[in-house]
Amino acid sequence: MSAIRTAAVVGGGIAGPVTALALRRAGIEATVYEAYENTADGLGGALMVAPNGLSALEVVGVQQGLAGQPIHRMVMTDGHGRRMGEFGGLTGLPPSQVMWRADLYRAVRERAAAVGVPTVYGKRLTGAVETPAGITAEFADGTRVTADVLVGADGIRSTVRRLIDPAAPGPRYTGLLGFGAHSKTEVPRARPDAMYFAFGERAFLGYWPVPGAGTAWFANLPYDEPLGAEQARATPSAAWMRILREKFAEDVPGRDLLRGTGDDELLTFGGLEILPSVPKWYRGRMVLVGDAAHAPSSSSGQGASLAVESAVQLARCLRDVPDAGAAFATYEQLRRGRVEKVAAQAAKTNSQKAMGPAATKIMALLMPLATRTFMKPEKMFGWTHRYRIDWDAPVTNRPRSAAGGTGSSR
């Protein structure tokens, strides 16, 4: 039985509350400490929660109240609206759910509050002091909190990651800016159970019909200069919309979706980032989870799902492995290979989104053949989407593999 009884979880986004929920189920009292003074209700764009993520959310009781739209298939088109390929869902699995990040955040936060997980706001971590008996988190307001372990669920610019390893890499810009909005335009013959990926000659656009309410869309715009969200938002939405309308002027249905979108409805997310491989996930009584340890590009469609998986696996390891160091090592063995494979695939997808007119035309010619032959849904997504965590299975400190025993793809 583990000697770990308490945990301080730094970060109140999605990974933090899920980690606290999983730790609580494992018999460990966890408190979430969030740097901002208020909740993040209403913030963020759209995201996909894949079947593996839905399964992990169910482990911590977040399966009800998710305001998602089921996506049964993914359709790839060129800039003229011509279908290049289509992928259906996997047999025996529920569909992925597309939803606003704010809706997932609210569901996770409300579940944590309902089961008594405390969340303390206005606590920006500045340091941590470890002793043989525990670890003390130090916050900017001068307060200190002591627990058995400190979990860094504080995102892609994690303070805990720097405390573990001052030389740890930071996020890397992918060369793409992210935008999204809701358009009044309805795309003819677009299916409400499908997500569409349109590879235009000058930019990439994804969209899905919202039954009775037009079309939701997101765009990835190649851009040389890395801009943070605040920097990007310093440019008026009308200016960005002019650029986007120009980029998609010849694309179908991009030009129509942009025409049906008001300037003031644009959501500007700034540069899309990916986190290079992090050499050290833990040190002493500190450990990373979610985007603090592994942040694949949003192109993966797996960021939230992987974060939830890691939260659950960390809790299982702390439940069953006798000491924190061995538990953290086991957790990393279970997770690193899987998350880095997802990140590598997402990097390839990013390159496709910014490959230029000539390469886009070549892809439009080759993609139909590829989807009829070797690019089959099971081969492409089975290993990712079929991954399941058996909460009740005991964890040893010598897991067989990242996909065997305690987390399986079947």
Image (spheres, helix red, strand yellow):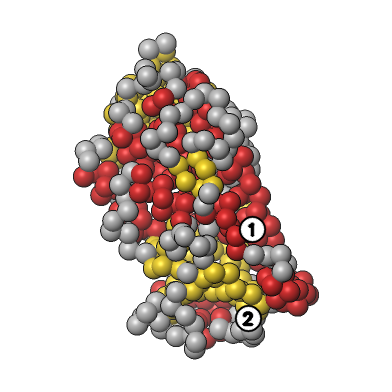
Single out the residue that lies furthest toward the bottom.
Answer: 188
In the displayed structure, 195 sits above or below 171; it is: below
In the displayed structure, 373 sits above or below 5; it is: below
Residue at the image point whose x is 41% and y is 25% from the top: 320
For disc 1, the marked residue is: 379
| Nearer the observer, 25 or 355 | 25
Q: Where is residue 94 in the image (x, y as percent from the top left)?
A: 43, 61
Looking at the rendered structure, the kind of residue marked 2 is Arg
In the displayed structure, 136 sits above or below 367; it is: above
Looking at the rendered structure, the kind of residue marked 1 is Lys
Mark 1: give few (<14), some (14-19) or many (20+) Cα within 10 Å. few
Quarter of the image where one finds residue 41: bottom left
Label 2, secondary structure: give it. Answer: strand
Q: Would residue 393 be visible to someone looking at this image?
A: yes
Disc 1 versus disc 2: nearer the observer? 1
Label 1, secondary structure: give it. Answer: helix
Quarter of the image where one finds residue 4: top left
For disc 2, the marked residue is: 83
